[in-house]
Image (spheres, grey):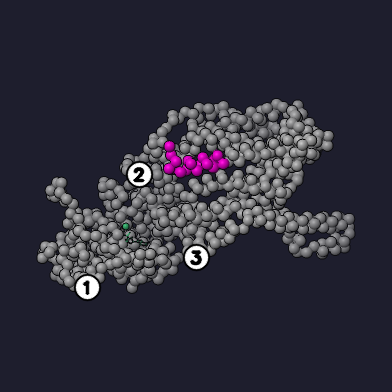
Amino acid sequence: MLLDVKNLKTHFPTQTGLVRAVNGIDLQVREGAAVGIVGESGSGKSVLSMTMMGLVPSPPAIISADQVQFEGKDLLKATASEMRQIRGNRLAMIFQDPMTSLNPFLTIGDQLSEPLLIHKNLTSSQAKKRVIELLASVGIPDPVARYRSYPHEFSGGMRQRAMVAMAVACGPALLIADEPTTALDVTIQAQILELMQSIRQNEGTAVILITHDMGVAAGFCDEIYVMYAGRVVERGPTERLFAEPTHPYTKALLSSVPRLDDPPGGRFRTIPGQPPDLTNLPVGCAFSPRCPYVIDTCRKEVPPLTTVPGESVAREKACFVEIRGKEAGQ
Amino acid sequence: MSIAVTKPTTRRRAWVEHPLSLPINVSMVLWILSFIAVSLLANAPWAVTPVMFVWLLANSAAIVYVGMHLTVPLDAPRKSESEVVAEGTSLFRDAMYRLRRNQMATGSMVILLLLMLACFSQFALFHLIPVIKGKDRAAFASDSFYALHLDHTRTNEGETYEPPTAQHWFGTDSLGRDLFARTLFGGSVSFLVGIVGTVVSVSVGVSWGAVAGYFGGRVDEWMMRIVDILYGLPFLFLVILIMTLVNGLGNVASSTDQKFAEAAAAEKAGDTDKANAILSEITPDQRTASIVTKFMPPIVVVFVAIGLVSWLTMARITRGQVLSLKEREFVVAARAIGARAPRIIFRHIVPNLMGPVIVYSTLTIPEIMLSEAFLSFVGLGISEPNCSWGSLASEGLAGVNIIKPYWWLMVYPAAALSLSLFGLNFIGDGLRDALDPRSAK
Ligand SMILES: Nc1ncnc2c1ncn2[C@@H]1O[C@H](COP(=O)(O)OP(=O)(O)O)[C@@H](O)[C@H]1O
Ligand SMILES: [Mg+2]
């Protein structure tokens, strides 16, 4: 197992109370796998990825876990300098907004050279050569001239390509992409996903794709984790999870995706109710106030993540109710 | 958002492509040639007027040259703000465009450059010519260009307190020294103090503020508490303290140097015992003082002392900026590639601070020049026969009396000082407006 996270929690003490942004997450990623993490905005996806990268300052944040094993090393027990050697080298990250995640005052070449200079002990001319290769490999035309460009001279799609090139510069084992295409328009989105897919196939880099877009996740990932209020509520192989969701929240997410056969002018299907207040989670299942299948137990106990019975593939859900084949309210 | 591949902008080489590049380049060459000519012909009385004429001409051309690059390009049609923004230029280029449109600021830049050029030319020539000609300052003929217009130390008993004349354009002082040369030299000193002091102040202030802001927590608290305490101490008290300490050190050093000289003289005379006796009297502390002052002449101390007490505001401004910058995504991205704190602070954060830092620096230069003027005014700054605008104004003030008002002694240096202070303030204001996108109109 490349990454094995058990019971990871990231809590932020704030004036209004403890924000339980990540509240006991288990996550496994095999070498070369493509894992998706989906969930509404505010469900803790970004905090989860930042915590794994060791980028959440603690204190103030309170971080705990049974383990965060990466390539045989526990990241939570690693020292700051060990962590720096892993970051950008074995474990890399792509951010949501390519407009703001590049430094406006440094040339693309200078920024892309940085991970190589930091981790690979290259001379600056070796790094330059490598960066030009990288720019070419992520499909940036005229990389020699582009090496000296500033970020504002790049379009959004090209910046995200540059960010991908920077993330994979050192040949990481795992790439965490936090909503890498959310800020891009649809055609560019497809290009970037394709680029990441080809990197995965050619380099064998495992990818965790974080998104709130079920369509993107379906197209890219082998396995999907559904997050709600800082917890995993369901995980399973993409096809099965889409074909027959076992958690009411997954089902609601899937049915809120607009479809071509929807009647034109109809209302968008949304999930009724409010997203949870992370400082003040309900007793029991966090989704219970919005859940059409809710039973009494749901309001008393937190459902544990358990294996879904009667499946040929490994699936898990955190729900007391069997919803397969049932309609809401039955 | 456009997906079109934008062409990388080729850096425009204005000095080649500008329609007036030929005459301007010729005058730049002329300026350099006249600089050399002044150096070579400095002792020939016949050459004074023509060389001076060419020199002034070339100086003006140089100013026009620089001024043109600062102002709106002559060939470019006026663009509206929205057009400039639509071109997708960087924030910085936008700002430069706005700055060029600000006539007060560009006018000030031209005047300041003229002043600085004149001052630094005198400074350079004053030191260079004797070296090039290989003779002593005193050996130049009294009617030579060098003696008349460049040597600010040359005294002339017959010409004390002369009002401005064709020969002494700004008049002479109580020792018959040419006030024109002294004003130019004083300008170099004032500008140097301003610039070096600002460099010290900016380097210390930005580093301090950036480290405090980036690390936050305890580090921040302690570092900013130190700034608060220093803020509480009166600024002049600190400078005067430093200057007094250094003056004391200087006194020790000069008496030590004198002993060394005596010992060397005794040695030469063959009296080794006496030489050893003198040397053994010198304590290690005195030796240290002597060495330290060799490396830190008092003028440098003025620079450093003023710089060291004027970094506090810079540190506060920087810290505030860093607090918000460090949350920006590109800083998080830099941490995500495993960069260490120094790299993040000085490579990623500090360049992004340049806007406020540049603005504040242009406002710090005049502030420091004024502090130096004040220190010299109260007799703590630069020492004779060197001078600064502050010390000249102070001498000039002593020369103002009702019976015989030697007005020129004060008017010229004070006017030059005020002109520069105004100019720098206008530039600072212009920069602040230009770098603030909200001020766009
Ligand atoms: N530093 C912080 N302090 C307090 N709360 C935080 C902090 N960072 C994130 N949160 C909270 O954690 C929750 C999860 O945020 P995030 O992980 O960004 O969600 P998303 O799934 O949209 O990426 C949000 O409610 C957010 O307000
Ligand atoms: Mg997010």
Does the magenta-highlighted stretch encompass residue B57?
no
Query: In the rendered image, which residue does mark 2 sit on?
Result: A155
Residue drawn at (49%, 29%), measured in percent from left and top? Answer: B74
- Chain ID at mark 1: A
Q: Residues within 10 Å of mark 2 (few under 14, many from 20)?
A: some
- Cα separation between marks 1 and 3: 43 Å
- Chain ID at mark 2: A
Residue drawn at (45%, 65%), measured in percent from left and top? Answer: A81
Type of amino acid at the residue the image marks with label 3: Arg
Q: Which mark is residue B218?
A: 3
Type of amino acid at the residue the image marks with label 1: Lys
Please state the quadrant of the image where ligand 1 appears: bottom left
| Span highlighted in magenta in the image | B425-441
Q: Position of residue B332 (x, y in %)?
A: 40, 57
Query: Which circle, 3 or 2, is nearer the viewer?
Result: 3
Q: Position of residue B350 (x, y in %)?
A: 49, 52
Q: Identify the main secondary structure in magenta.
A: helix
Q: Which residue appears farthest toward the front when viewing the image?
A: B402
Q: Is residue A330 above or below residue B299?
A: below
Q: Are marks 1 and 3 in contact (CB under 8 Å)?
A: no
Query: Which circle, 1 or 3, is nearer the viewer?
Result: 1
